[in-house]
Amino acid sequence: MIPESFDYQRAGSVREALALLKQHGDEAKILAGGHSLVPTMKLRLATPGTLIDIGGISELKYINDKGDYLAIGAGTTHWMVESSSLVQQKAPALSQAAAQIGDVQVRNRGTIGGVLAHSDPQADYPGVVLALNATIIAEGSGGERTIEAADYFTGLWETALGDNEILTEVRIPTDSANANSCYLKFPQPASRYPYVGCAVAMDKSGGNCSDVRVGFSGVAESAFRDDGVEDAIRGQALNDDTIAAASAKSAEGRSVLSDYFVSEEYRRAMAQVYAKRALTQLS
Amino acid sequence: MGDLIGKSVKRVEDNRFIKGEGKYTDDFNMDNQTHAVYVRSPHAHANIKGVDTSKAEALDGVVKVFTGQDIADAGIVGSICGWQVDFKNGDTMKEPGHPIMVADKVRHVGDAVALVIAESKNIARDAAGLVEVNYEVLDAVVNPKEAAQDGAPLVHDDVPNNTIYDWELGNKEETDAAFEKAHHITELSYHNQKLVPNAIEPRAALGHFDSNEDKYTLYTTSQNPHLARLVIGAFVLSIPEHKLRVISPDVGGGFGSKIFVYNDECGVLWAAKQIGRPVKWTADRTEAFFTDCHGRDHVTDAKIALDKEGKIIGLRTKTYASLGAYLSNFSSCVPTYLHGTLMQGLYTTPAIHVDVTAVVTHTVPVDALRGAGRPEATYGIERLVETAAREIGMDPAEFRLKNFIPPFDGVKQPGYQTQVALQYDSGNYEGALKKALKNANYEKLKKDRDKARAEGKLLGIGFSTYIEACGIAPSAVVGSLGARVGLYDAASIRVHPTGKVTIYSGAHSHGQGHETTFSQIVADSFGIGMEDVNVVHGDTESVPFGMGTYGSRSLAVCGSAIMKSVDKVKEKGARIAAHKLECSPDDLEFANGSWTVKGTDKSVGFGDVALTAYVPHSYPENEEPGLDFASFYDPANFVFPFGAHICVVEVDKETGQVKIVRYVTVDDAGNIINPMIVDGQVHGGVAHGIGQALYEGAVYDDSGQLLNGSMLDYCMPRADNFPMFETDTTVTPCPHNPLGVKGIGEAGTIGSTPAVVNAVIDALSDYGVKDLQMPLTPQSVWAAMQS
Ligand SMILES: Cc1cc2nc3c(=O)[nH]c(=O)nc-3n(C[C@H](O)[C@H](O)[C@H](O)COP(=O)(O)OP(=O)(O)OC[C@H]3O[C@@H](n4cnc5c(N)ncnc54)[C@H](O)[C@@H]3O)c2cc1C
């Protein structure tokens, strides 16, 4: 388990990291918590010539209440997200997801920016940031740009992030749906990554489900918003029948992952079970 | 005896382990040392058309690259099989060779084809990636039953039908007759799936040849350094024993996988001599998955026959056992003498027939893994018994009590002669089950289950009452059955002039806590403190020729050798004491660290006697100085621990996830030296067995690729999978060894697997599910509920 040799650069600021990225070009990779990148390097599936470590950049580690939204720095660790009372109040789904990632060591090192940049189809956060309608901020040599979560996950291991861009911030709207959100996870028994992760944010002012967003992690090649479920429950009274009918739509019409260990049929069925449980929990 | 035996003395070795200061093979380094990496086959079955090492050799820092051809040219055979099991018709067991590295053909993913040696491990790893091997990929076979069929791809050209031997035990005619007159027959087909051992420390070796002394040294991760020295010296590399020192320092777990002498370590030692520099090799986790011997992989059809009253009258099994691609040291005895001989279980079954076909497949070699054969046997028996009870509408606990062998202590009542060769030493099987039923509060538990079911929850209760044979073994018996080694053990006790004691143990601890247990028995025997005793193990240069640690034998066999040496020390000590006290040794009694003239207050202490032995100024005539004795102990029989496990599970109706709600054990390991260590062994063993039931299992595709060869996909059990285990014991002493002890290292693993599966099947009874194949993954449980 030894990676190929590589050069290592430590960036003191985002600006410095961007300059280093530009300088080293294709053979460079950003290193954040290292908890996805280093394992793939050890298996020699990734062989970057240079690592640009942004793990020490303190300006990337924060959780701030900006009124309309929570601003979370890309370098914020899973543990910081999990334990933040601000996140627990305004976006409980995110803190619940953080709390279920890996183990304590992983949560102390891994970062939200790292997860979203890596876009592992099995990661927890992606479905959550979709359900929370988050915005992702990326910085490149041309400056900052804003990417809606809905446009961010573009396919298997693919995102809208450019090669020479650094993800700097995640913005979570502080709306009433996000304040009433949850994340439920069916972990793969060995890796504990999700077979199925379901995040739901629901506005139920007036008793009925007035607005809802449902995001799935782990189910398909990339995380997705499930408008089938959303449409079926939006505007409905919340009871066993409406929830059962809505959750039955989970992943409908989408291709879902399957392998020897989890068949397509089983994954679909579990997506339904977890959607049902999440909707029930919020109603 | 003093008051240490029976106490939960804290483990003395944990002082260094919990501080991370244990010293493992990879912690040792030598001057001028090089680093080795093996190049391994990515294919399960392929001809090697060519190996090009030139790019690797050209890399800066590479010292040497050896290939399978170099091994062939050197005329070296590989590691050997230590147990010969012949065919039913008398034909000799097939023993295909296993060269240290292969030159012509690879037979499993992970088979070694080249060895790269470099100045650093990083360079060696880089260079290994530059070795180009041209493979012609061939069809593979991975399933044991399919491997034996005509037309299956052959693993070795000289092994027709991939069959290494076929074998039977028991009485076929009587068993046929039992099934003919049976009132009820229960049948099951099951796969004791292939398990990866996954010791936390991967295998490692540091080999050195000292040309001045003409002597080899090998540091390695072995459960039995003397056995390693014997096999490497006498069979693989032709090194005289006195010219080879094997040191097995702290070892981070083995579970059987470090019993065996692997080619990899032999190759390291051989290479060290060739290049004239020390060579170090440490496997990485991936290599561990692809080269540590796996366990189990038995495909079995089994039947049990009952009479009208629900008594078992016959049992029959037919097993196809995979040995993997090559025969590892003890691979051949696991499906036979460690499996077939256990088919009596705890029951009075009068007619048993066991049939085993052992095959090679294109998979990682299979050998002993915690329990080795006994878990496979116990799984079959306990699944059959529980299923049969359900089918005839009898409570599974009651069914067992009805069929148990009655209690016998092996002293007043003789040992129990089974239908399958073994003679059980002592047992009180109903005692263990009744205690477990009481501890679990079974009557209430049944009501809870029924109540939960009425509320729509799937609660299930499962049993397993097991026996196992360990403390291997009487050498003459195993010799007559094909073993090529003796299975005694050895220990010496050196009492130092000041009365402190060093134990030199042939057994080797790789997690078991010998430094504590052995010290307890010796300190107690001499009336001295734990701190006055030290245990040395693992270095062939200092410890006597013992056979090492596996098969739950350390205390029963090596502990008995220790007690023999204790007796010799005490006998001689009494003669010295008698001389000092001017009496006859017969007038003395030994207690609390002193010899006292009976009926008087005249006494002399252990330390005094020790000093006198080394400063023999006033000394018995014709008595040698010194107080230092070695002993060998060859057991009179196996020891037979047993017990009863009760498992309660809840199955999630919607997802198929199984949650273990309670786990109750009553194990009987004879007399107990350290209850805490026994408890720890039960915890680890039960966790391991639950792993087989619910989580673990090597999965191969048809081309022979291991699909879950990493911790991402191969599921090891973890602490949060379990409730607090409710452990307890009964004590039925072993009648034939000095301490009256049995063994507890594997009991938990052997007992637990069927208890869990039985509980899940019970939970699914409303769905008419009679059987499920392990591991019972959420998906498989869910699928069973759908159909
Ligand atoms: C044992 C273990 C268990 C785990 N379990 C889970 C789990 O249950 N659920 C789960 O979701 N995850 C799990 N993970 C993954 C973990 O969450 C990682 O921390 C995360 O995937 C990556 O974050 P990181 O900060 O470590 O990124 P790194 O590994 O440092 O980087 C990952 C990738 O993202 C890029 N990158 C990182 N930061 C940025 C940035 N700011 N801008 C642009 N590119 C960037 C890197 O170049 C790299 O390609 C587990 C990991 C381990 C080791």
Image (cartoon, coloured by chain):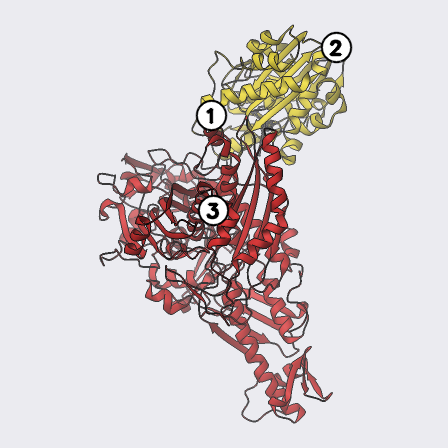
Quadrant containing ligand 1: top right
Side of A47 relative to B51 (left or right)? right
Mark 3: few, some, or many residues within 10 Å (few <14, many ≥20)? many
Is residue B385 visible in the rendered image? The answer is: yes
Residue topped by disc 1 = B786
**Residue at the top extreme of this rendering:** A235
Side of A19 relative to A66 (left or right)? left
Is residue A143 visible in the rendered image? The answer is: no
Q: Amino acid at mark 1?
A: Gln
Q: Nearer the viewer, mark 3 or mark 2?
A: 3
Residue at point 62%, 73% (across, down)? B501
Q: Rounded to the nearest whole Å, what is the CA distance between mark 1 and mark 2?
A: 47 Å
Check whether the beta carbons of the residues at disc 3 and disc 2 lie within 8 A of each other: no
Residue B74 sits in quarter: bottom left
Read off the chain for label 3.
B
Image colour for chain B is red
Q: Nearer the viewer, residue B442 or B78?
A: B442
Residue B628 sits in quarter: bottom right
Identify whether B71 is placed above or below B732: above
Q: Position of residue A21 (x, y in %)?
A: 58, 21
Read off the chain for label 1.
B
Image colour for chain A is yellow
Q: Position of residue B706 (x, y in %)?
A: 40, 36
Residue topped by disc 3 = B197
Q: Position of residue B592 (x, y in %)?
A: 69, 77
Residue at point 37%, 60% (across, down)? B419
Residue topped by disc 2 = A68
